[in-house]
Image (cartoon, helix red, strand yellow):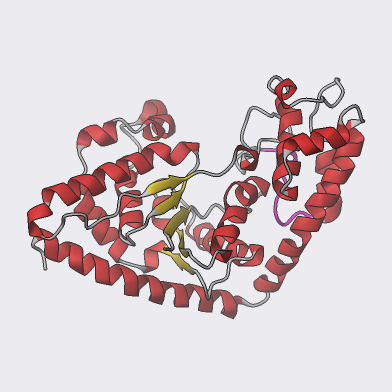
């Protein structure tokens, strides 16, 4: 039996190799499995927990959807939509906020990290946004949720909310209403680090664009960035164990492994003892081979705004059909219907 898979992606714009290998490439594979039913949601309501430039937010939302499509996600097979266009998300978030407990939210480490010392000045939305994330997932009765390390705790909260709702309303038709979603965690090689510091994740927030490969980078720029990527003065090692204290080398090999869908050990066997320039030249060729079709498709979509609007409208209609059916049942269970 197929699985219902839900994933929410924040609209950050200028998506990079880390976004592609860490999430989007895996989404494409999930989308291609005929047994799966996939929903990909651009979570713009989550984005406004911090101040946003309205124009940039709209542009970033379209850019994220365009990247999904350019990377190979089929909008006819999967649902791709914009969260704010489906009002059931906000409605479910309020209902499930009344199920969630304050103590659960107080344990969320990501809020503490993002708020820092100014937690009294940040928006209340930043504090309660795990409830909205739970609503996003549970609204579609999802079985599996792709998550990174930074979202594992939020999925645990979602599971707690689902279980409490089912228990609280077990006598009123709520028993086992929500499936308890499981995390879908991808392999370690899909975790991409900065090209200048192998201990930090590749990020758009880094000042220098030389720290990352952006999906719109031209071929010459990809070659330049990889050639200047930090390594170390030692030869390429023979064993995986030797990579533990060589984060920049490990990062380049992980990228090679994930892009080429080949075990790291095979790559080490091919390049052990060789110059880093050999590895970097071949990695650049592989990146260009994989990313240039995506860049070309992004340019094509840029020139066809009607197509993007059609995809989002169609996705919103499909998402509304599913979510409105479930929110109606949720309200009936708790006595609002």
The N terminus: image quadrant: bottom left
Residue at 30% x, 32% y: name it: 120
Q: Residue furthest front?
A: 1
Task: Provide residue 163's location: percent of width, then percent of height.
Answer: 22, 46
Residue 308 is one of the magenta-drawn residues: no
Task: Provide residue 278's location: percent of width, then percent of height.
Answer: 91, 38
Q: Quadrant of residue 24?
A: bottom right
Task: Provide residue 2's location: percent of width, then percent of height.
Answer: 44, 63
Viewer-proximal residue among 279 and 68 = 279
Locate residue 286 relative to residue 200 in the image: left or right: right
The C terminus: image quadrant: bottom left
Task: Provide residue 78's location: percent of width, then percent of height.
Answer: 50, 69
> Is any atom of residue 124 visible in this view?
no
Magenta stretch, residue numbers: 207-217
Locate residue 337 relative to residue 227 in the image: left or right: left
Residue at 66% x, 71% y: name it: 302
> Is any atom of residue 180 visible in this view?
yes
Residue at 8% x, 62% y: name it: 335
Check the image and report above or below for 267 versus 167: above
Q: How many marks?
A: 0
Locate residue 13 relative to residue 179 in the image: left or right: right
Q: Quadrant of residue 231?
A: top right
């Amino acid at each position: 039996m197929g699985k219902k898979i839900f994933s929410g992606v924040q609209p950050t714009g200028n998506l990079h190799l880390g976004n592609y290998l860490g999430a989007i490439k895996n989404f494409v594979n999930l989308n291609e499995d005929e047994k799966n039913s996939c929903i990909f949601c651009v979570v713009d309501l989550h984005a406004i927990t911090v101040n946003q430039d309205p124009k940039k937010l709209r542009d970033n939302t379209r850019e994220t959807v365009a990247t999904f499509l350019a990377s190979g996600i089929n909008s006819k097979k999967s649902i791709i939509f914009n969260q704010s266009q489906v009002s059931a998300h906000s409605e479910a978030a309020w209902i499930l906020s009344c199920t969630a407990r304050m103590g659960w939210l107080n344990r969320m480490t990501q809020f503490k990290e993002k708020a820092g010392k100014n937690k009294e000045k940040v928006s209340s939305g930043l504090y309660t946004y795990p409830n909205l994330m739970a609503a996003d997932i549970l609204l579609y009765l999802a079985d599996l949720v792709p998550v990174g390390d930074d979202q594992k705790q939020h999925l645990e909260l979602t599971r707690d909310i689902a279980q409490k709702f089912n228990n609280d309303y077990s006598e009123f038709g709520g028993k086992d209403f929500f499936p308890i979603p499981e995390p879908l965690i991808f392999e370690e090689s899909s975790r991409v680090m900065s090209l200048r510091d192998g201990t930090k994740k590749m990020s758009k927030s880094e000042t220098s664009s030389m720290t990352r490969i952006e999906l719109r980078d031209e071929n010459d720029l990809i070659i330049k960035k990889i050639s200047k990527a930090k390594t170390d003065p030692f030869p390429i090692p023979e064993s995986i164990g030797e990579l533990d204290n060589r984060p920049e080398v490990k990062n380049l090999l992980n990228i090679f492994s994930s892009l080429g869908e080949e075990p790291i050990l095979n790559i080490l066997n091919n390049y052990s003892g060789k110059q880093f320039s050999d590895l970097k030249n071949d990695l650049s060729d592989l990146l260009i081979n994989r990313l240039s079709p995506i860049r070309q498709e992004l340019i094509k979509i840029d020139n066809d705004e009607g197509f993007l609007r059609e995809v989002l409208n169609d996705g919103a209609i499909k998402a509304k059909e599913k979510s409105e059916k479930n929110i109606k049942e949720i309200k009936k269970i708790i006595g609002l219907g």
